[in-house]
């Protein structure tokens, strides 16, 4: 059927680089697949038929490619069919299988070594995190540092274990065999008996610094040779802020820990640049933007006084406590402020509560022509685009 | 929506799926040739390959709107390094850094470039259906989509029927565990399906019968009850053995049923379990101590035992002890020990009984390992029973070729027991690693990214 | 002409949301009012971020946003609230409850 072959040739743009097999053991099939595509047409199916069913006169239902696939699955692919508990079983491990004693590669896709299958929390570690946070009342920050787990992950684990406990209490069905099988298939971070195990082999990097938009540009900024140009100055250059006063530089240099805690505990005091809508906060140094800035202060103390391990430990605990109380205080104040703005009325005759929020109708909000975007209520004379193409018409958030 | 996510072999396309066709296609995937191809052609092939995998269910225009050229990335910071210097050494001298910043260190830092372009399709990972697939709750993105549309998925405790819902950091999504077991479990074979049909028919018949016979049965049951109570004491002694026997039968049926479907490891386990059970059974004919302590250990196994265990254990145990001591004096010491602390001393009793040469025919086989195997097998059997009413093969075992695709990216925190996961943050790139699971190499990722930059 | 404080319906089909407006009594509902002084969402909302125990006892709420000083001013110059707005202003503590006979 010449026209059909032609058609396949034209449409199949991906075939040339999807060769069938790479291993030398099936060199015959590999060489077949490298032949021109006309070999793939149904006319070639007779050869495979001849091999598998020599006396049958009916046309084979299986194409050559399917035959090839099943032979591969029976030979090399056999190893991928079932997992061996405790180790990964990825396709990229196939070519490493010959050498014994080597750890299998951790990337699941052979062509993409930049994505690796990273370990997940084991069941025991998960329960331990829950116990530390809920039973022992440790702060999320402290647990995160102790176990080398991201703070957001700690929070998520607490939520999930709580949900699990509730479901167990209600007697709902759970997927226990499934969970067991998954934990056998993928790498897991075990719960170490001592704290040192977690310190040397943390689950993940806890001090990830997000790359700021401002730092993506390259700036040529001439500085005199005698000047001490550090991270703080670089941040100011990135956000186009003027250089710091000498007195302030000296003050920050004398007590860097205080400078960091001032920024992290009162983010509203950060200096701003720009006017009006363009007003932005000055880009802070990495010491302040990482999730655990108190660790830097701790390390600095240890570097300065290497012989005072115990004092450093005590100071670290104190610092942690200060950070925690400051965080709590900040949360409380913001909650209080939100409560103050809101008037809650619960009339006896009604099933509902009424929440009155204060808004402001003034020249500033409404504008000269009464169409200001900050004015309360829906606006007049402005078309609503909510059903237009490109608008998101499904829910964008679900409150807890 | 029509399912266009087929995995043909003649026109191979990779999909977000765990099927063996997809595995075969993944196995023969190579980077597309760039020789004698214009830049446009390279970009086109790269984009078409990548889009067949990433968000094939999303329309192209919709994806083009979602695409963002700003790619999130992080740099892991070391607090020790931050404490050591304030960064001024990097810009000291003539601006190229001081001498003490060694070139070797710089070279190492440069070698781990951040694979930004492998993150081209990161916005799609926010979609609910893709996230469900990534959390390994569904065997393909299409199946995940079906779960969402059919109302089996909740987000933050509320049912969410839109597969295109973009998860926000901190959102908790949950799929019904039964669906997940179905999606990830091996399918039933012909015989199991038939069994299920038969069981269903039987159940419908019995319910009809029961309704009719209920009134008549009540009176009869009352008279029987007194007899039953009398027998209960005897039955209980038999019960642990019966439980073991049924478990053994189950294990046998599994072994006999589908030999090729099980992994070698699991077969070994089951065989060990069979052996252990057999040994215990043969032994318990002569020594009731073993069954008794087994009862206390695995009481969860049988509901019947659980109900009456605490009441009757003491007097029954003492009775048996007397018999025991009459028969064998050597055994009695171990028996009393195991009776006093049944949970703790079980292994001890087992070992003693196994080492006792007078009593057992097959001596010294029951090692600690085997006992562990038995224990584990019993617990597994309880969690994973044979139930023909389920839509998947029971006892549950993972699908074939599932392990080749088993991965959970870091931006999700998954609790498999309850089939719930939290979307922690958006996927990010870090030096040397990207968090978007994509089967394609750097060349495809870069070309696809270039395509969506809209400068062609 | 009487100036009234009343509600003007916005939003889509089955999802109403109201502006609290000050307008001439005879003007159309959708015409441009003298002033918009707030909004009223009649669809009850479930409170969020609660524990299980709290969630069981919590009442659903209706959101009102209101500029109280402007409302006071308009009441002072003789604007007459409509029935439903009267109830809202009463809850906000700006007017006395209406007697039953007047309704």
Image: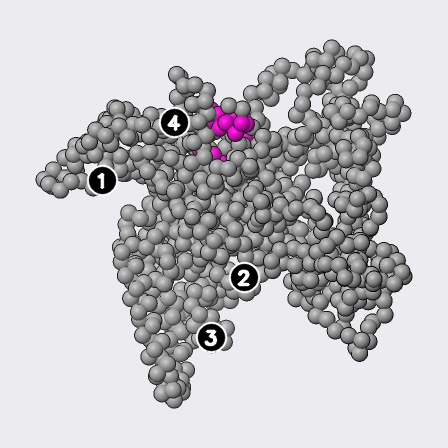
Q: Residue, x 80% and y 25% (percent of image)?
A: A241
Q: Residue furthest top?
A: B94
Query: A121 left or right of B39?
Result: right
Q: Chain of mark 3?
A: B
Q: Secondary structure at mark 2?
A: helix
Q: Are marks 4 and 3 on the same chain?
A: yes
N-term mark: 4 or 3: 4
Q: Give the quarter of the image for residue A55.
A: top left
The first of marks 1 and 2 along the sequence is 1
Subunit of label 4: B
**Start and end of the magenta stretch?**
B432-454
Q: Nearer the viewer, residue B212 or B78?
A: B212
Q: Find residue A358 and report its image quarter.
A: bottom right
Above/below status of C29 relative to A285:
below
Please state the chain letter of the residue tagged with numbered disc 2 in the rendered image: A
Please rate how many residues cluster around mark 3, counting C-alpha atoms within 10 Å: few if below 14, some from 14 to 19, many from 20: few
- Residue B308: give its label: 3
Query: Marks 3 and 1: which is nearer the front?
Result: 1
Give the labeled residue for mark 1. A62
Q: Of A350 and A287, which appears nearest the observer?
A: A350
- What residue is disc 2 on? A168
């Amino acid at each position: 059927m010449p026209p059909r072959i032609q058609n396949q040739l034209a449409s199949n743009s991906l075939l040339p680089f999807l060769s069938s097999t790479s291993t030398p053991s099936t060199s015959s099939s590999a060489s077949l697949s490298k032949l021109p595509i006309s070999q793939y047409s149904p006319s070639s199916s007779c050869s495979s038929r001849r091999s598998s069913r020599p006396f049958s006169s009916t046309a084979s239902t299986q194409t050559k490619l399917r035959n090839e696939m099943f032979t591969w699955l029976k030979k090399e692919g056999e190893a991928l069919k079932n997992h061996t508990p405790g180790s990964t079983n990825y396709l990229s491990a196939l070519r490493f299988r010959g050498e014994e004693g080597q750890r299998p590669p951790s990337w699941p896709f052979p062509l993409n070594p930049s994505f690796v299958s990273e370990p997940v929390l084991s069941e025991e570690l998960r329960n331990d995190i829950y116990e530390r946070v809920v039973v022992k009342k440790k702060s999320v920050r402290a647990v995160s540092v102790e176990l080398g787990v991201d703070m957001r992950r700690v929070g998520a684990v607490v939520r999930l274990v709580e949900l699990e406990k509730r479901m167990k209490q209600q007697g709902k069905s759970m997927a226990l065999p499934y969970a067991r099988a998954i934990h056998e298939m993928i790498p897991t971070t075990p719960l170490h008996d001592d704290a040192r195990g977690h310190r040397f082999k943390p689950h993940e990097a806890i001090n990830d610094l997000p790359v700021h938009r401002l730092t993506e540009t390259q700036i040529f900024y001439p500085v005199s040779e005698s000047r001490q140009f550090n991270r703080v100055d670089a941040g100011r250059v990135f956000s186009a802020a003027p250089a710091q006063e000498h007195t302030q530089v000296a003050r920050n240099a004398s007590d860097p820990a205080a400078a960091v805690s001032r920024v992290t505990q009162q983010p509203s005091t950060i200096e701003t640049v720009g006017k009006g809508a363009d007003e932005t906060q000055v880009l802070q140094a990495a010491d302040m933007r990482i999730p655990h800035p108190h660790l830097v202060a701790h390390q600095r103390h240890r570097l300065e006084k290497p012989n005072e391990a115990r004092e450093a430990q005590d100071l670290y605990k104190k610092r942690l406590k200060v950070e925690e109380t400051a965080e709590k205080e900040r949360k409380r104040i913001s909650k209080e402020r939100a409560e103050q703005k809101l008037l809650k009325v619960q009339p006896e005759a009604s099933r509902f509560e009424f929440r009155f929020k204060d808004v402001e109708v003034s020249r500033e909000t409404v504008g000269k022509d009464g169409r200001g975007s900050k004015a309360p209520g829906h606006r007049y004379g402005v078309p609503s685009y909510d059903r237009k193409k490109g608008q998101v018409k499904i829910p964008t958030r679900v409150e807890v | 929506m029509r399912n266009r996510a087929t995995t043909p072999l003649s026109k191979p396309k990779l999909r977000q799926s765990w099927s063996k066709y997809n595995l075969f296609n993944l196995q023969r995937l190579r980077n597309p040739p760039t020789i004698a191809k214009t830049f446009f052609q390279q970009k086109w092939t790269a984009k078409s390959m990548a889009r067949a995998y990433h968000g094939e269910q999303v329309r192209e225009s919709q994806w083009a709107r979602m695409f963002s050229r700003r790619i999130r990335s992080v740099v892991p910071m070391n607090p020790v390094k931050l404490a050591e210097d304030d960064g001024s050494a990097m810009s000291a001298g003539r601006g190229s850094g001081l001498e003490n910043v060694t070139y070797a260190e710089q070279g190492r830092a440069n070698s781990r470039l951040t694979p930004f372009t492998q993150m081209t399709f990161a916005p799609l990972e926010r979609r609910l259906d893709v996230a469900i697939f990534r959390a390994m709750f569904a065997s393909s993105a299409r199946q995940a989509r079906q779960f969402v549309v059919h109302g089996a998925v909740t987000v933050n405790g509320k049912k969410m029927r839109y597969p295109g819902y973009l998860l926000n950091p901190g959102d908790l999504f949950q799929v019904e565990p039964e669906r997940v077991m179905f999606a990830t479990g091996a399918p039933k074979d012909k015989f199991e399906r038939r069994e299920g049909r038969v069981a269903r028919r039987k159940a419908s018949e019995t319910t009809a019968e029961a309704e009719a016979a209920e009134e008549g049965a009540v009176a009869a049951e009352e008279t029987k009850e007194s007899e039953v109570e009398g027998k209960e004491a005897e039955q209980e002694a038999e019960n642990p053995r019966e439980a073991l026997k049924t478990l053994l039968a189950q294990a046998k049926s599994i072994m006999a049923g589908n030999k090729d479907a099980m992994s070698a490891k699991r077969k070994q386990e089951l065989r060990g379990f069979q052996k252990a059970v057999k040994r215990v059974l043969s032994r318990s004919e002569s020594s009731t101590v073993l069954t008794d302590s087994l009862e206390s250990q695995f009481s969860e196994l049988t509901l019947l035992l659980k109900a009456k265990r605490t009441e009757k254990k003491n007097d029954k145990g003492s009775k048996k002890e007397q018999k025991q001591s009459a028969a064998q004096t050597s055994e009695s010491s171990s028996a009393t020990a195991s009776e006093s602390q049944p949970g703790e001393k079980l292994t001890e009793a087992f070992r003693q009984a196994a080492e006792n040469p007078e009593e057992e025919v097959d001596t010294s086989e029951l090692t600690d390992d085997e006992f562990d195997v038995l224990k584990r097998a019993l617990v597994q059997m309880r969690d994973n029973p044979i139930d023909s009413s389920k839509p998947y093969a029971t006892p549950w075992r993972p699908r074939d070729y599932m392990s080749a695709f088993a991965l959970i990216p870091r931006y999700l925190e998954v609790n498999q027991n309850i089939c719930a996961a939290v979307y922690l943050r958006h996927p990010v790139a870090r030096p040397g690693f990207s968090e978007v699971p994509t089967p394609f190499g750097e060349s495809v990722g870069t070309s696809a990214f270039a395509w969506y930059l809209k400068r062609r | 002409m009487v100036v009234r404080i009343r509600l003007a319906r916005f939003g889509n089909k089955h999802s109403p949301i109201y502006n609290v407006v000050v307008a001439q009594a005879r003007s159309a509902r959708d015409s441009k009012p003298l002033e918009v002084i707030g909004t009223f969402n009649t669809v009850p909302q479930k409170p969020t971020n609660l524990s299980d125990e709290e969630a069981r006892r919590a009442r659903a709420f209706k959101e009102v946003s209101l500029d109280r000083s402007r409302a006071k001013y308009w009441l002072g110059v003789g604007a007459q609230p409509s029935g439903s707005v009267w109830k809202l202003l009463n809850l906000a503590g700006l007017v006395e409850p209406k007697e039953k006979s007047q309704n």
